[in-house]
Amino acid sequence: MDKKEKTKEIKKKLVDTGNQGRKIPNIIIRGKNFGKAVSRHIKNGCEFVEIDEYEVRIEVCNDCEMRNGRICTHPQCGCYLEEKAWWSSESCPLNKW
Ligand code: SF4
C-alpha cells in the first residue's frame, strides 16, 4: 500500500470515531499552528516517516482523549492527524510520539 492509499484508509478510520464532542481549536489558532508546522516541515526537507512509524503514531492518536475524529484538539495542534503523522518534523504536543 502506498502513502496515498494508506492516508485514505486512515482518514476513513478516524473520521467517524473519537470524542466527537471535544472542542476543536478555533480557525485562527489552527491556521497559526498549521503555518508553524509547514515551516518546520520545509526546514526538515519535507521528510516523511516510514509507514511503520506512521502506523504507530496513528494507533497512539486513535486511543488518545484529545482526538476528535480526524483532528487533534490540543491547543498547540488542531491538525488533521492522518496528514500530521506523516511529517517527520512533527511531534505530539503531549509527547506521546
Ligand atoms: S497528536 Fe498527541 S495529543 Fe494529539 S491526538 Fe495524537 S496523541 Fe493525542
Image (tube, helix red, strand yellow):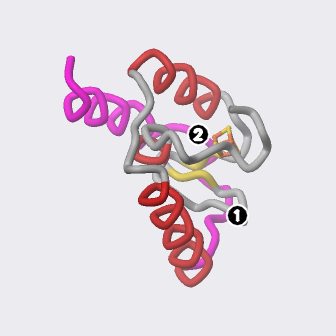
Disc 1 target residue: 76
Which residue: 51% across, 37% down? 17
Residue 56 drawn at (x, y percent) = 56, 20
Which residue: 40% across, 46% down? 83
Specify the segment rendered in magenta.
1-26
Q: Does the magenta stretch include residue 19?
A: yes
Q: Does the magenta stretch include residue 4?
A: yes
Q: Which of 23 and 72 is in front in this view?
A: 72
Residue 2 drawn at (x, y percent) = 20, 24
> How crowded is the residue under tag 1: few (<14 C-alpha within 10 Å), some, or many (20+)?
some
Please determine whether, in this image, residue 60 is positioned above or below residue 38.
above
Please determine whether, in this image, residue 54 is positioned above or below residue 83.
above
Which residue: 32% across, 35% down? 12
Q: Nearer the viewer, residue 95 or 7?
A: 95
Q: What element carries label 2?
A: loop
Disc 2 target residue: 18
Ligand 1's quadrant:
top right
